[in-house]
Structures are given as C-alpha cells and as structure tokens.
Amino acid sequence: MLYASLLAYLVPVHYSFVTTDIALVLLSDKSLPPIFIRFLIAVFYGFFGATQSVYAVHFIYRYLVVNKHHLIESFDSWKIVIWLLVPVIVGASWVLTELFLCGPDKQIIELSREEILKSFGKPIEHFEFLGGTMYDVMKDGTITSHYKFLGAAVFMSVTVNASFAIIIFCAIKCYSYIDEIIETSSTTSSKTRAIQKQLFYALVCTILIPVLVLDIPVTSLLILNLANTGIGAKSAYLSFIMTFYPVIDPLPNFLIIEPYRKAVLGTFIRKTNVVQSVPMSMLPSKI
C-alpha cells in the first residue's frame, strides 16, 4: 500500500544513458521541498528492497513448515522479531545506500543536463533525482570508475539475487516435498490435493510478478549501464512496466485459487442477475 502510494505520488521515471542511471521525479507538481522528495525517492527504493526480503522470509517459512524443521519454532516465540527485522534492515539499508551513495553531485548534474533537456524538454533543475554514473570513458580510452555508485549497484544486485536464490531453492524443495506427500498419502482427498497445488502455484505466480515487472527492468538498466549502452528515452518504457506491479500483484490469488475465483465470479454474476431481474414497472416510462 505504501509502495503504491509513493509510486502514485512521485511517478518516478528511470532514465538510463551511456553508463549513467538515474530516477527522476518532476518537481513542478509537488508541494514538498526538493530535499524531502529526494528522501521519498530513497524510501521508495527502500520498499523495493524490503519487498524482496519479505518474499524470501515467506518462502523460508513455508520451507520450514513443510519439512517440519526445528527452526519453525522460532516463528512461534520472541525470535519471530528477528525474522520481522530482516525486511526492515534490508529496506533501511537500501534507503541509506540511495541517500549516501546515489545522491546527486555537480558532476552527475552537468553530465545529465543535456540528456534530460533533450529527452524531457525541461532543465534538470526542474527534477529531483537519485542515481549515478558507473564509470567514464575518456577520449584516450582510459576508464575512470565511480566507486560510490558502483558499490550501490553491487549492493542492490546482491540483495536482489540473494533473495531470488533463496526463493528458488525453497520453492523447489517445497514443491518436491508437497508433491511427494500428495502422491503417497492415501488419506488426502482429491479436493485437498487440488487446493494445495493451487495455493502453491498462486504463491509462485505472486513471486514471478515482481521478478518480471520490477527485478528484470531494474537489473536490465544496470547491465546496460555497465555495458556502456544506456537506452536513453526508451528507459521510460521500463518505468511504465514497473507501474503495473501494485495492480497485478493480487491477481494470482483471485485467478488461480478456486474458492476465491468462484467468489469473485459469483459476485459479478449476482450483480448481473439483480440488474436483469428489475421489474419493467420500475423502469421509467419515458426516456
């Protein structure tokens, strides 16, 4: 909810050119001071990082439950605070990384000035942004690295990939174990088996959505910058794709899990029947 609210308010545009990647927010329609907008951009990305760890902890929990691991007891004691702190720590780390390693300086402002004016028709002073340049290629072919932004990019890539690796490992283990239990158990009804599989498939799809609309676009921009092939104004298409996340995130549960699907369809069917069953006498005689 907070992530979606920040997305709607900030409307950030990810812009990538050559070896530079920045997230721009137009200030003309914002009542808050620029420094606070910069902080909100960092918080926005903090939620992005925290989301990755939330899914990782979720899959670890499912893995421990399915395998009846002794660590599952940590979720039923005060130790659950440790698990809950993981997304908070990761999110806060992203916020601090953005503020201290990706803050705008004179060099990045001058480097981006011409590109921003050409693509958006507005001077860079009309925007607040976070980001940076990975390296500069000099005329003589020498490369000057910008270690602050490179460090930020490495940190963000590591946290995203680590979460994704945990999710994949736990998902495969859970699926194998659940499938084995369902196939070997003689007391499990076919309906229970179907629901178990639907719940798992819905969870997998819920993970795939942020991977497809958040992780891949952001990672693609960083890889293109590293290869000195930023895509310029076309970066806006990736920003547009990312805006779909809050909308489509809950859809797998409603479309895959049968009881939810029937409830949603039943609601629409009942509304349709109510409209169709209105007596003719209640309709206006003159239109």
Image (tube, rainbow, N blue to C red):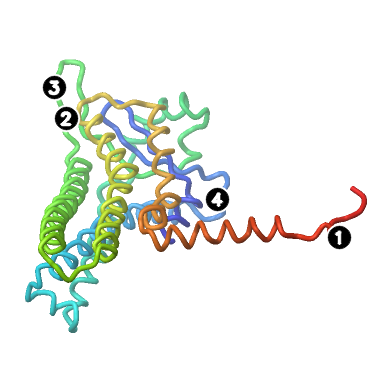
Give the residue pinned by disc 1. 281
- At horizontal 32% and vertical 45% (from top left) the residue drawn is 214
Report, in whole angstroms, how far the alpha carbon at label 2 lies from the one at label 3. 7 Å
Residue 30's label in the rendered image is: 4
- Determine the secondary structure under disc 3: loop
Q: Does label 4 or label 2 sit earlier along the sequence?
A: 4
- Determine the secondary structure under disc 1: helix
Q: Give residue 115's position: percent from left, percent from top.
A: 40, 26
Of tags 4 and 2, the one toward the viewer is 4
Report, in whole angstroms, how far the alpha carbon at label 4 lies from the one at label 2. 36 Å
Give the residue pinned by disc 3. 142
**On-image quarter of the N terminus:** bottom left
Q: Does label 1 or label 4 sit earlier along the sequence?
A: 4
For residue 44, which quarter of the picture? bottom left
- At horizontal 53% and vertical 60% (from top left) the residue drawn is 266
In the picture as drawn, the residue positioned furthest to the top comes out as 140
Along the viewing direction, whichever of 199 and 76 lies nearer the viewer: 199
Query: Taking 15 as reference, is 186 above or below it?
Result: below
